[in-house]
């Protein structure tokens, strides 16, 4: 997690943790935080005059030293922290008034709006966002492993509310599945790190199955389609355990 850049564009937003964004214990849920990150990212690109660009998430890393809590006022800061040939990394720091904080790094792939194939970023993007990357390059390579052959799977119903304006399951829904895994592993609590990799889009009519395995202070999970292909892979582990 690279820190705030010494040069280049940063963008700040503010919001408050609301009732529907919290766990029963009152902490900010990861799926709600993912929506916050998504909204702030969209606000930034719109403010920069680049709302017409089309992006999809390839991977997200979230580090949580301490969760923000119900009614916390939040300050959120975002910037471009790295670049590839057809993708960019966006960092977001979320800081709560009560002492909670979250750090995220999301790799967004730039798509042609008609073909939906990866394409290089525009010159306007380069002019506005490249300076804050400070020349840092990033890879789009995925690192989480494949599920074991004996993984036990359970159906995961896809709901109408899971789909966004691109007509596929929104990336924040993966964090709903992560939250279900956290409910099973009560020992996995902040400070923690969550890695999520999006292998393929989930379209209408896709049948999903979810499974995971626990290894000491870590949990690995996968979301598979009806043919057994991995759509999403994720890992939860305690900060400092890697």
Image (cartoon, rainbow, N blue to C red):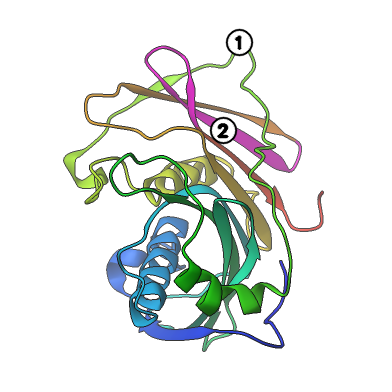
Q: Mark 1 near mark 2, Cβ–Cβ under 8 Å? A: no
Q: Does the magenta stretch include residue 219?
A: yes
Residue occupied by mark 1: 150
Q: Position of residue 215 (x, y in %)?
A: 73, 33
Q: Camera-side residue: 33 or 111?
A: 111
Which quadrant would residue 90 be assigned to in this image? bottom right
Residue occupied by mark 2: 221
Which quadrant would residue 52 be assigned to in this image? bottom left
- Relative placement, left or right, of 198 versus 99 is left
Q: Where is residue 173 in the image (x, y as percent from the top left)?
A: 37, 46
Q: Does the magenta stretch include residue 57?
A: no
Looking at the image, how many numbered discs can be counted on the residues? 2
Vertical placement of 93 versus 139: above or below?
below
Residue bounds of the magenta highlight? 216-231
For image coordinates 28% across by 40% down, the residue present is 168
Q: Position of residue 71 (x, y in %)?
A: 37, 82
User: Which element is circle 2 on?
Assistant: strand
- Dot 1 or dot 2, earlier in sequence: 1
Vertical placement of 109 versus 43: above or below?
above
- Relative placement, left or right, of 134 versus 230 is right
Q: Can residue 32 be seen in this view?
A: yes
Vertical placement of 25 versus 86: above or below?
below
Q: Where is residue 166 in the image (x, y as percent from the top left)?
A: 25, 47
For image coordinates 46% across by 75% down, the residue present is 69
- At label 2, counting other C-alpha atoms closer than 10 Å, the crowd grade (few under 14, some 14-19, many 20 or more) is many
């Amino acid at each position: 997690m690279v820190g705030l850049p010494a040069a280049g564009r940063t963008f700040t937003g503010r919001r408050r943790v609301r009732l529907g964004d919290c766990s029963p214990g009152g902490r900010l849920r990861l799926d709600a935080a993912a929506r916050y990150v998504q909204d702030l990212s969209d606000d930034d690109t719109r403010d920069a005059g680049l709302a017409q660009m089309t992006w999809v998430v390839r991977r997200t890393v979230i580090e949580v030293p301490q969760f923000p809590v119900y009614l916390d006022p939040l300050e959120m800061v975002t910037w471009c922290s790295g670049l590839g040939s057809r993708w960019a990394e966006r960092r977001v720091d979320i800081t709560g008034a009560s002492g909670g904080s979250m750090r995220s790094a999301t790799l967004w792939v730039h798509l042609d709006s008609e073909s939906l194939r990866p394409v290089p970023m525009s010159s306007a993007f380069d002019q506005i966002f490249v300076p804050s990357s400070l020349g840092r390059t990033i890879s789009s390579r995925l690192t989480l492993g494949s599920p074991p052959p004996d993984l036990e799977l359970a159906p995961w119903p896809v709901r109408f509310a899971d789909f966004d304006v691109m007509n596929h399951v929104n990336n924040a829904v993966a964090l709903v599945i992560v939250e279900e895994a956290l409910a099973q592993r009560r020992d996995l609590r902040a400070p923690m790190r969550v890695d999520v990799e999006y292998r393929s889009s989930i379209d209408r009519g896709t049948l999903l199955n979810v499974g995971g395995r626990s290894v000491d202070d870590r949990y690995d999970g996968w979301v598979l389609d009806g043919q057994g292909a991995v759509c999403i892979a994720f890992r939860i582990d305690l900060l400092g355990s890697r």
